[in-house]
């Protein structure tokens, strides 16, 4: 557990350290730097190398700048936003961006629709990314030639709209950077801390829950109280069963049964003492010392607990387990009935016998196991 806690804390520090460079250098920054002294730039995260000469050969006059980004760049901004931002931050007036297989273009010399049309058509070109880039660059070069020949310029109204688009794109980029910063600096550390607290509570909270909530009352005879203390110690063992097997559910159920037996037995002797039923208390002392001792015996780590956690090592593990569970439940029910008899000023009646069950436990090592009798069948004198 100590190693797990250290690992989670180390992961938190790593997440924070990773968050800082992720916001310091963006794909946009890399593209702007790469196009500062080159017409084409390709991110190192793009697996397929692009033939720069082939792509730039489609633009003889060298007017179209090309930025090739990985598909993951779309988590930072859309291809159209990248095109606008790169064009704004560099000396290039026409920019083509590829983010994965998505293409987008922006140009000061063309209307927005005229600049984007060659990029859209190139996405449908058969072949790999390199072929699509060649088609897009050729289309943009042709559109620039046509605009120059026809003397078309972007009018004031369209220029205003383009400037607004630039501002909107920059604003979206800022929002994304802020959100990623919050994710790495706040969300990731808080998540890891929450997981650490969860595991610590599960680990150490389980240990705390293993303590029985009630000790035998002072009215409980000493020899019976000693047996109940052994039961309380067994309760901790059942609560701390951690094997990823079907044993966990019956183990927790048996821990609850032990709690009821300890609580109700203590209450029985407390009521016997309060009502001054000395003779009945003496009878109960003999009976409960014997019966609780048998419960301790069959629930010990060499019988029922071992059957639950290692059923593969036992013959008829399901039958043995059912016999133990039925007998212990019947004994718990008898304790409640005895309390009712004390309240009604009646003699105590003991109808549950654990002799057969204890005998099956003792005989298992000698291979003499046989299905025990019903716990309600006491041998007749």
Image: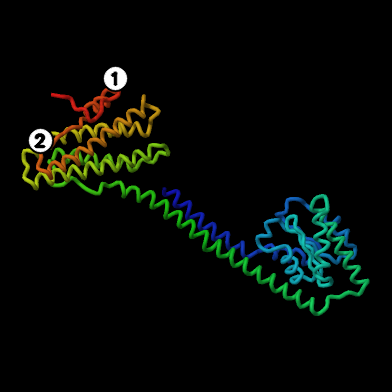
Q: Residue furthest right?
A: 149
Q: Position of residue 130 (x, y in %)?
A: 81, 53
Q: Can you say which quadrant of the picture contains the C terminus?
A: top left
Q: Is residue 283 above or below residue 91?
A: above
Q: Residues within 10 Å of mark 2 (few under 14, many from 20)?
A: few
Look at 30% across and 30% down and name the residue there: 323
Q: Nearer the viewer, residue 181 or 78?
A: 78
Look at 25% across and 49% down and name the residue there: 213
Q: Nearer the viewer, residue 259 or 340?
A: 340
> Which image quadrant for residue 279?
top left
Q: Position of residue 35 (x, y in %)?
A: 77, 65
Q: Is residue 119 above or below residue 208?
A: below
State the residue position of label 1.
368
Determine if residue 107 is in view.
yes
Judge left or right: residue 198 versus residue 352: right
State the residue position of label 2.
283
């Amino acid at each position: 557990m100590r190693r797990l806690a250290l690992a989670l804390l180390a992961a938190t520090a790593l997440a924070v350290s990773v968050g800082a460079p992720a916001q310091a250098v963006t794909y946009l920054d890399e593209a702007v730097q790469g196009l500062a002294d080159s017409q084409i730039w390709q991110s190192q995260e793009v697996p397929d190398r692009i033939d720069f000469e082939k792509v730039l050969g489609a633009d003889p006059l060298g007017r179209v700048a090309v930025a090739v980004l990985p598909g993951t760049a779309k988590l930072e901004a859309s291809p159209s936003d990248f095109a606008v931002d790169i064009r704004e931050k560099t000396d290039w007036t026409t920019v083509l961006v590829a983010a994965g297989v998505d293409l987008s273009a922006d140009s000061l010399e063309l209307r927005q629709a005229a600049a984007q049309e060659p990029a859209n058509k190139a996405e449908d070109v058969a072949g790999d990314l390199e072929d699509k880039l060649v088609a897009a660059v050729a289309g943009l070069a042709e559109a620039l030639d046509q605009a120059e020949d026809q003397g078309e310029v972007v009018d004031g109204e369209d220029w205003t709209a383009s400037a607004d688009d630039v501002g909107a794109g920059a604003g979206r980029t800022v929002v994304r950077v802020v959100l990623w910063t919050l994710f790495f600096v706040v969300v990731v550390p808080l998540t890891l801390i929450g997981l650490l607290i969860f595991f610590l509570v599960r680990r150490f909270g389980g240990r705390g829950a293993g303590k029985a909530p009630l000790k035998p009352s002072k009215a409980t005879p000493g020899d019976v109280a000693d047996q109940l203390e052994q039961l309380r110690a067994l309760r901790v063992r059942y609560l701390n069963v951690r094997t990823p097997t079907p044993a966990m559910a019956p183990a927790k159920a048996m821990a609850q049964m032990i709690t009821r037996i300890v609580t109700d037995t203590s209450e029985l002797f407390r009521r016997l003492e309060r009502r001054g039923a000395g003779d009945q208390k003496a009878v109960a002392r003999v009976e409960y010392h014997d019966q609780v001792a048998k419960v301790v015996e069959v629930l010990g780590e060499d019988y029922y607990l071992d059957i639950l956690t290692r059923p593969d090592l036992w013959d008829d593990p399901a039958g043995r387990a059912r016999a133990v569970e039925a007998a212990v439940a019947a004994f718990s029910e008898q304790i409640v009935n005895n309390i009712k008899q004390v309240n009604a000023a009646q003699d105590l009646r003991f109808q549950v016998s654990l002799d057969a069950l204890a005998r099956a436990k003792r005989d298992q090592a000698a291979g003499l196991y046989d299905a025990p009798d019903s716990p309600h069948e006491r041998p007749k004198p």
